[in-house]
Image (cartoon, rainbow, N blue to C red):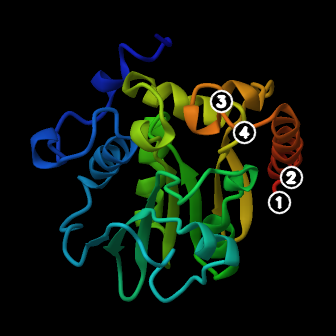
Amino acid sequence: MDKFGLYVSQLLPFKEHFLPQAHRACMGCGVALGVRQAYKALEETRDWMKGTSWEIPCKQPLPGSLIKSKKEEKEEIRPSLLNIEKRGEARLFLCFDNEAVEGKPTPTVFKKWYPSVAVARGFHYVATACPSYPFDLIDKVKRGMESEGSSYIHILSPCPVGWDFDSELTVNIGRYAVECAVFPLYEVVTGSYRLTIDHPKLRPVEHYLRLQNRFKHFKQKEIIEIQVEVDREYAKLREGKM
């Protein structure tokens, strides 16, 4: 157990808005964990449920504003999208991505289109988050809600069933995704990139892959190629650009 494991639940807001008996998520579901934390982040926002809608699975990355790439259409990526009304026409989009794809995952599954497209479309606040880092996620949801204009947060949501790992490993899998820089945590404010969690010494990507049976078909050559791509993209983020 990591050093925060015993204390996180005591430091988060106490009131529960996402009750376990009210959903049918699987044990260890990363989406359920992320939604629970997002609801805690929004509890101080008055009447935030008004004008809120869910789309599960999401057929479009963002309703009417983002365009699917050929890769997305081919692999049928289906995240869950929480669409929250802010001020005027501004909205906060929370995308809970469990990387559900048809067929075997490939190395390019690590390329995240949605945040970069949201930046290109002029969203005022864009960020990535993961429930394995609850304080980072909660802070970003709050900033996304408070920022001017529309906001988009892409939340990695480990899936024990789809990714084929033991349910008790959900939090560790999410942490490894960040520590390996497969899923870096950053925010973009008016076009400026900033890492919110930075690990000076990254874990090898292989540590993340070997915890999940969905990647058991990967050859060593493919893992090396992924490592090179991850290192290159992370170096860009550290320079404040993508």
Which mark identifies residue 236?
2
Whether label 2 touches label 4, CB < 8 Å = no
Q: Earlier in the sequence, mark 4 or mark 1?
A: 4
Q: Earlier in the sequence, mark 2 or mark 1?
A: 2
Secondary structure beneath disc 1? loop
Foreground label between 2 and 3: 3
Amino acid bearing label 4: Ala
Quadrant position of residue 109:
bottom right
Whether label 4 touches label 3, CB < 8 Å = no
Q: Earlier in the sequence, mark 2 or mark 4?
A: 4
Amino acid bearing label 3: Tyr
Q: CA distance from mark 2 to mark 3?
A: 21 Å
Q: CA distance from mark 2 to mark 4?
A: 12 Å
Mark 2 residue crowding within 10 angstroms, few (<14) / some (14–19) / many (20+) = few
Secondary structure beneath disc 2? helix
Looking at the image, which is closer to me, 207 or 76?
A: 76
Residue occupying the point 66% across, 32% down? 209
Q: CA distance from mark 2 to mark 1?
A: 5 Å
Residue occupying the point 71% across, 57% down? 111
Quadrant position of residue 12:
top left
Q: CA distance from mark 3 to mark 1?
A: 25 Å
Q: Position of residue 181 (x, y in %)?
A: 72, 39
Q: Position of residue 31 (x, y in %)?
A: 37, 48
In this image, 52 relative to 199: left or right? left
Whether label 4 touches label 1, CB < 8 Å = no
Residue occupying the point 83% across, 41% down? 222
Which mark identifies residue 181?
4
Q: Earlier in the sequence, mark 4 or mark 3?
A: 4
Which mark identifies residue 241?
1
Amino acid bearing label 1: Lys
Mark 4 residue crowding within 10 angstroms, few (<14) / some (14–19) / many (20+) = many
